Image (cartoon, rainbow, N blue to C red):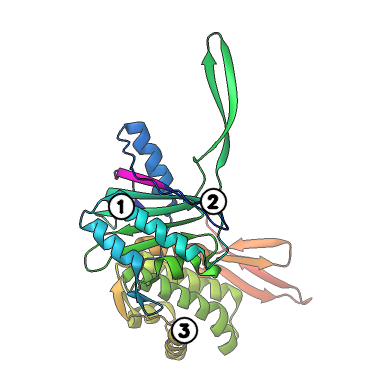
Amino acid sequence: MINGKEAMVEEFVLHRIGTEGAPSILSDYSAVLQGLEEQEFLRKLFLKPFSTQAQTNEFTEQIASADNVLQGLCNKLEKGTDLVATSRAMAQHLIEVAEQHEVRTGDLFVARFHGVEMGGAHYDGVGLYKFDDKDVFLESRAEGDKLAMQLKRGLGGRKPDQALLVLFTPLAHTLFVIDDKPQTGFWQRDFIGLQPKKDHVNSTRNVLEMTKNFITEQLPQDYEIPKADQIDLLNRSVQYFKENTEFDRGHFAQQVFQTDAVMDSFQRFGDRFQEDRDVELQDNFAISADAVKKQARVFKSVLKLDKNFHIYIHGDRNKIEQGVDESGRKYYKIYYEQEL
């Protein structure tokens, strides 16, 4: 979803966030690295961690009856205010929030971007990254006719412990989040203040998740359905999303479930899913190919038979038959045209 291969990291600021008595250090300058090698490294460090994110978010207007501090600061950056001063305010906000949680001391990077690609369009934005640990690496250098080596600590391939990418999309900013401890509420609830965005990305993700739960949890309760038929329904569901650019719930239900009784059960399950998860399932929306690619990974198409065999079902359900022989042994008969 996020493509940063052609983006520019315009400048970034590093602050030290101290906790549990450790001092905080707020920088009063920014770094600008415009070389090709430097930009490639910064894109890998700051943007690549978001390349697999498939959930979009937006700021919650208020946190605990107060205005959203981080949202206001991001609004200032969108208007072109100084990154150093604004990032210091962001760091101070993080320090105050961290006092309410058990948070480790770490480095906070705040970076300004130009030309980050999302959905075929390019946006400016800002990223915030908290690193609690550093990688250990071995540095070698030539000293005359000898080689010297030294162990050092730094950032390279390590992902941030918490991160936020804010893209300055029209109407409302689009947020992507990395959080290694989401259950604490420190990063997402108290520091950022966010909620899922009501867009086609989350609509795609929510409907696919609801459909998977319906097929694997509700259908077996309503009907005696063979495992192979369940897998076939999962495959047909994903195939619909891959072959169409627009989702229509009625058309989807007809194409996948076909019978009126199952379609009615699907509709009722969807209503309960919305209420239980506090999400809105739209009847029509543009399908997000990135969300389909991400969500399809959890649609299991493996038929497990005891501990002896795994059958992967990806295609025509009519080419596999289930039965029981005269001695009571269960079997599957598989038809195929050629070995590959």
Residue 184 visible at all: yes
Residues shaded magenta? 7-14
Instruction: Give the x, y percent position of residue 149.
Output: 59, 23
| Label 1–label 3 contact, CB within 8 A | no
Residue 315 visible at all: no
Residue at the outermost right position: 327
Label 2: few (<14), some or many (≥20) within 10 Å? some
The residue drawn where x is 30% and y is 52% is: 85
Q: Which mark is in front, 2 or 3?
A: 2
Q: Please, what secondary structure does the residue beneath circle 2 have?
A: loop
Q: Please, what secondary structure does the residue beneath circle 1 have?
A: helix
Looking at the image, is mark 1 or mark 2 earlier in the sequence?
1
Q: Please, what secondary structure does the residue beneath circle 3 have?
A: helix
Q: Nearer the viewer, residue 246 or 106?
A: 106
Q: Nearer the viewer, residue 54 or 264?
A: 54
Looking at the image, is mark 1 or mark 3 earlier in the sequence?
1
**Does 318 appear in magenta?**
no
Instruction: Give the x, y percent position of residue 83.
Output: 29, 50
Q: Which residue is mark 2?
A: 132
**Does 9 appear in magenta?**
yes
The residue drawn where x is 25% and y is 60% is: 76
| Label 2–label 3 contact, CB within 8 A | no
Residue 273's disc is 3
Location of residue 330 (image quadrant): bottom right
- Residue type, mark 1 in image: Ala
Q: Which residue is mark 1?
A: 85
Structural distance between the alpha carbons of marks 1 and 2: 23 Å
